[in-house]
């Protein structure tokens, strides 16, 4: 029996994000992409997924705009799968997932860690509000209905107020919190 989907879930950014990358195999493919792998055979060897299942997953990632498919060889035609800008924007999500899991482990139990490539120092990523510098893990940060919320989402968050995301002006375009901090151009977390 299929799960019942609530109306507010259809517009919830958490639900829609999981619809893009919620499968186990999708996360592993993205992990390989961020590690520099681009070719079908590399994914097949690293992940151990059947070729038909891998083909389906890669097609879905291309169809959703996360990867782009381009020929790297003509005879026979072979393709590589490269992250799009949209796909690269998922890097902080994967970094946060890995950091969340590593936080549950003792340092000597961690099989993979995030390091600064220039210093080799282990990095503990934190998602911050660039205006206050506070970690968004603080309970004072709450979800609230946004400007596009439908009646169900508005009802769910009735009583919670939200300030517009724009915090400054740059030329004719509002400057968003993303523009002034929170993530670097490489998609990494900004530090407090």
Image (cartoon, rainbow, N blue to C red):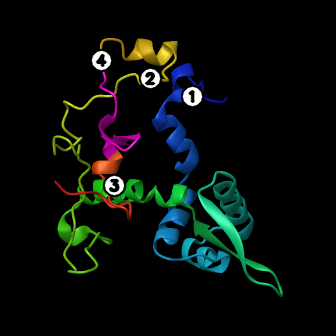
Q: Where does label 4 land, which residue?
A: 160
Residue 148: horizontal and vertical position, in percent?
Answer: 49, 24
Q: Which residue sits at x=32%, y=60%?
A: 184
Q: Name the residue under label 1.
A: 10
Instruction: Say what secondary structure mark 2 lies in.
Output: loop
Q: Do the residues labelled 1 and 3 touch (CB within 8 Å)?
A: no
State the residue lying farthest toward the front. Answer: 171
Q: Name the residue under label 3.
A: 96
> Is 149 or 166 nearer to us in this picture?
166
Residues 191 and 29: in front is 191
Residue at 46%, 37% in the rendered image: 14
Question: Which residue is disc 2 drawn over?
Answer: 147
Cα distance in 3D space between marks 2 and 3 = 27 Å
Q: Is 154 on the left or on the right of 112, as rendered? A: right
Percent x, y for residue 123? Answer: 22, 67
Give the residue at x 36% y 12%: 158
The residue segment tinted magenta is 160-177
User: Is 113 one of the magenta-colored residues?
Assistant: no
Residue at 19% of width from left, 68% of height from top?
107
Within-10-Å neighbours for mark 4: few <14, some 14–19, many 20+: few
């Amino acid at each position: 029996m299929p799960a019942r989907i609530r109306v507010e879930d259809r517009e919830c950014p958490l639900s829609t994000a999981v619809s893009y990358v919620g499968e186990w195999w999708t996360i592993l493919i993205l992990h390989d992409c961020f590690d520099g792998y681009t070719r079908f055979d590399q994914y097949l060897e690293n992940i151990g997924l059947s070729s038909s299942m891998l083909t389906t997953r890669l097609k879905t990632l291309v169809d959703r705009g996360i990867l782009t498919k381009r020929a790297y060889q003509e005879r026979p035609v072979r393709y590589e799968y490269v992250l799009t800008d949209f796909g690269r924007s998922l890097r902080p999500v994967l970094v946060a997932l890995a950091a969340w899991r590593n936080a549950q482990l003792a340092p000597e139990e961690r099989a993979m860690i995030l390091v600064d490539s220039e210093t080799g120092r282990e990095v503990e990523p934190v998602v911050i509000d660039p205006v206050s510098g506070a970690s968004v893990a603080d309970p004072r940060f709450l979800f609230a209905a946004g400007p596009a919320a439908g009646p169900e989402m508005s009802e769910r968050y009735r009583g919670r107020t939200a300030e517009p995301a724009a915090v400054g002006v740059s030329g004719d375009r509002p400057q968003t919190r993303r523009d002034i901090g929170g993530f670097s151009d490489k998609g990494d977390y900004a530090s407090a």
